[in-house]
Image: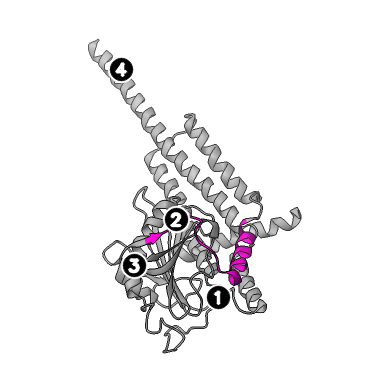
């Protein structure tokens, strides 16, 4: 058991280094497909009209840019994971104030309760009347909070904030962002 | 209705079909041991550095402080982005449908995460270590300033005595 443990630990460190490198050398534009990207998504980048995709014509980068305008965030770019449906942007650190990372993922074909992380700390509720679930520390790491919002038919939008180690602050921030993103999502009634 | 309202933590009831798959996946990620050598070294190192600084055993000037802080922040800030990617990845995995589809989604997420049993706990351990190293630097800079001030005061006293002579 112990001998099995060492190589994965090294792999973890190597992986951490790789991801950090990738994050600091981000360039704008469409992320190219890679072995780490696009898990579980089959939607094309342009999202052509599809009766089962309520997000057709909607781009998560544009939505984030619109909602975060004037708040010190750079232009949103596709994430490494699930690049076709997810964008993120990070307001840089200001001295001792932690950076604020915001991600938006528009995911057709899956219900908003399906992948809630750390369910014992999650809570049901709504954003502007739209059914939603708030997940606190979905990976049991402080400083992260997400909101899954329902988008009909059987689709969902995830707003995720990761910032420092203050989970309450992350939840407060993600609620504020979700309230501004919600009106831009397809109507859910 | 405007604004957002949520119940108390724990009020969420997962749907019966897909809930346990997500929970199983996450418990696999989170239940691993947190004692891998590399992560442990970073954690212990940061903690040791902090206690040294607290005991006044080292000081750092402004230039050195800025360089160390930059390195610490590079890791701490990078950790946020990495945690975001892992969450997006885990959240995007299609857990529903056939058991085959579920296995494939889970496998993909695990491969991209590295070791599903140890990655996140070890990264958290390293993050805490780097945070402590950062805190150590803040104390060490204070130590340096206080020492410098003590030197300045002593020097001024000496000057005064010399002038009085």
Which is more foreground, mark 3 or mark 4? 3
Residue marked by disc 1: A39
Mark 2–mark 1 distance (CA, rounded to whole Å):
25 Å
Which is more foreground, mark 2 or mark 3? 3
Q: Decide whether residue B16 is among the magenta residues.
A: yes
**Mark 4 crowdedness (10 Å alpha carbons): few <14, some 14-19, many ≥20:** few
- Whether marks 2 and 4 lie on the same chain: yes
Q: What percent of the width, then of the height, locates residue A118?
A: 54, 59
- Whether marks 2 and 1 lie on the same chain: no
* Residues shaded magenta: B5-30
Q: Residue at x 36, y 32 (%)?
A: B145
Q: Which mark is residue B158?
A: 4
| Quadrant of the rendered image containing residue A60 | bottom left
SS label for mark 1: loop
In terms of depth relative to the viewer, which is nearer, A90 or A173? A173
Mark 3–mark 4 distance (CA, rounded to whole Å):
70 Å
| Mark nearer the N terminus (2 vs 4) | 2
Which is more foreground, mark 2 or mark 1? 1
Q: What percent of the width, then of the height, locates residue A1?
A: 76, 55
SS label for mark 2: helix
Residue marked by disc 2: B77
**Mark 2 crowdedness (10 Å alpha carbons): few <14, some 14-19, many ≥20:** many
**Is residue B64 toward the left or the right of residue A139 in the image?**
left
Q: What percent of the width, then of the height, locates residue B3?
A: 32, 63
**Is residue A35 toward the left or the right of residue B139 in the image?**
right
Q: Name the chain under label 1.
A: A
For the residues labelled 1 and 4, say whether their Cβ atoms are less than 8 Å apart. Answer: no
Q: Judge whether residue B55 can be spotted in this image.
A: yes
Mark 1–mark 4 distance (CA, rounded to whole Å):
71 Å
- Whether marks 1 and 4 lie on the same chain: no
- Whether marks 3 and 4 lie on the same chain: no
Q: Which mark is residue A128?
A: 3
């Amino acid at each position: 058991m112990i001998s099995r443990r060492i190589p994965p630990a090294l792999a973890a460190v190597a992986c951490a280094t790789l991801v950090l490198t990738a994050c600091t050398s981000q360039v704008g534009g469409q992320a190219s497909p890679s072995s780490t990207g696009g898990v579980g998504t089959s939607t094309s980048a342009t999202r052509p009209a599809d009766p089962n995709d309520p997000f057709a014509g909607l781009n998560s980068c544009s939505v984030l840019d619109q909602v975060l305008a004037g708040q010190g965030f750079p232009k949103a770019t596709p994430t490494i994971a699930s690049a076709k449906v997810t964008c993120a942007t990070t307001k840089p650190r200001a001295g001792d104030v932690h950076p604020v990372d915001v991600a938006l993922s528009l995911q057709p074909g899956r219900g908003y309760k399906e992948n809630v992380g750390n369910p014992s700390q999650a809570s049901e509720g709504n954003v502007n009347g739209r059914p939603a679930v708030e997940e606190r520390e979905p990976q049991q790491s402080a400083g992260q909070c997400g909101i899954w919002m329902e988008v009909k038919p059987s689709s969902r939008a995830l707003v995720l904030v990761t910032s420092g180690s203050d989970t309450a602050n992350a939840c407060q921030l993600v609620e504020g962002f979700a309230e501004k993103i919600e009106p831009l999502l397809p109507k859910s009634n | 209705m405007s604004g957002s309202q949520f119940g108390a933590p724990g009020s969420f009831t997962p749907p019966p079909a897909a809930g346990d798959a997500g929970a199983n996946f996450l418990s696999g990620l989170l239940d691993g041991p947190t004692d891998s050598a590399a992560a442990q070294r970073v954690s212990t190192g940061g903690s040791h550095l902090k206690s040294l600084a607290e005991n006044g055993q080292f000081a750092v000037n402004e230039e050195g402080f800025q360089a160390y802080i930059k390195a610490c922040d590079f890791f701490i800030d990078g950790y946020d982005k990495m945690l975001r990617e892992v969450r997006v990845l885990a959240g995007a995995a299609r857990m529903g449908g056939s058991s085959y589809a579920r296995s494939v989604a889970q496998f993909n997420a695990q491969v991209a995460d590295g070791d599903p049993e140890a990655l996140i706990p070890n990264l958290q351990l390293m993050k805490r270590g780097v945070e402590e190293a950062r805190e150590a630097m803040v104390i060490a800079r204070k130590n340096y300033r206080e020492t410098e001030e003590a030197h300045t005061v002593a020097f001024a006293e000496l000057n005064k005595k010399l002038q009085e002579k």
